[in-house]
Amino acid sequence: MLEIGPGTGTLLKIFENHNIKTTAVELSENMATLAKQTSPNSVIINDNILNVKFLNNQFDFILAMAVIHNFPENDLIKLLKKIKLWLKEDGYFILDTTNNKITESGYFEKEDYDTRVERYRRKWKKEDLNKFLTKQGFEIDELVNYKDPTSGKEWLIYALKKTNNK
Ligand SMILES: C[S@@+](CC[C@H](N)C(=O)[O-])C[C@H]1O[C@@H](n2cnc3c(N)ncnc32)[C@H](O)[C@@H]1O
């Protein structure tokens, strides 16, 4: 499996423990170092996923947890094209992101930080994201809504498959 943006590598470790061959691409050098410590048996590449090359049909699973909202729409289209090439025909692409009242992009202040930090976010409304993913050639195999009791945020967890005719 391939994990995009593993952060500290906690999820990667769970897959490692199940003897799954794991590769991850992490943009942040600090996070990549932490992920290597947490998941020493994974291949961790410190790079932008948009700059990395893999073989066609290389992966059974590709994961992007809490990652796609970092991508402007045009970059996300580029990423999804790559994922379609890298994923096996019967493979799964798993992603999650928050559900928002409207779809919008911009720099938003982090609500859960002590210091004032603004971050780029592409905030998706569920219905818009569903249409977008379908247009990019993915079908929704399963969609789970999860409300984080701490933050009150609603998360959308998708299990996606490649659409056959695209
Ligand atoms: C919010 S964190 C999520 C970390 C982890 N997946 C989790 O769910 O806890 C997003 C991660 O994606 C990484 N990331 C963002 N853009 C990326 C890119 N273009 N290529 C690779 N990693 C990226 C960030 O550095 C960060 O570690």
Image (spheres, helix red, strand yellow):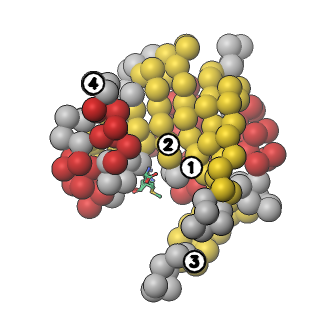
In percent of the image, x 62 and y 23: which residue is there? Answer: 161
Whether pointer 1 and pointer 2 mark residues with C-beta atoms closer than 8 Å, the reply is: yes
| Cα distance between the residues tagged 2 and 3 | 22 Å
Provide the residue designation for mark 4. Answer: 19
Question: Is residue 12 visible in the rendered structure shown here?
Answer: yes
Classify 115 as above or below 3. Answer: below
> Of the numbered discs in the image, which one, if any, rests on residue 111?
3
Does the CB distance between marks 2 and 3 fall below 8 Å? Answer: no
Separation of marks 4 and 3 at Cα, in angstroms:
37 Å
The residue positioned 45% from the left and 20% from the top of the image is: 60
Tell me the distance, in whole angstroms, between the alpha carbons under discs 1 and 3. Answer: 19 Å
Q: Amino acid at mark 4?
A: Asn
Q: Where is mark 1, residue-wise?
A: 68
Q: Are marks 4 and 1 in contact (CB under 8 Å)?
A: no
Q: Residues within 10 Å of mark 3 (few under 14, many from 20)?
A: few
Camera-side residue: 95 or 69? 95
- The residue type indicated by label 3 comes to Glu
Could you tell me how far apart the alpha carbons at marks 1 and 2 are, in whole angstroms? 7 Å
Give the spatial CA distance, label 2 vs label 4.
Answer: 20 Å
At a point 50% along the width and 85% down the height, the residue shown is 116
- Residue 55, percent from left and from top: 38, 21
Tell me: 160 left or right of 66.
Answer: right
- If you read the primary sequence from the N terminus, does the residue marked by circle 4 or circle 1 appear first? 4
Q: Secondary structure at mark 1?
A: helix
* Residue 53 x/y as whole percent: 37, 31
Mark drawn on residue 64: 2
Work out whether mark 1 precedes mark 3 in sequence or the reverse, and give the earlier one: 1
Which is more N-terminal, label 4 or label 2?
4
Q: Amino acid at mark 1?
A: Ile
Circles 2 and 4: CB distance less than 8 Å?
no
Measure the C-alpha gap from mark 4 to mark 1: 27 Å
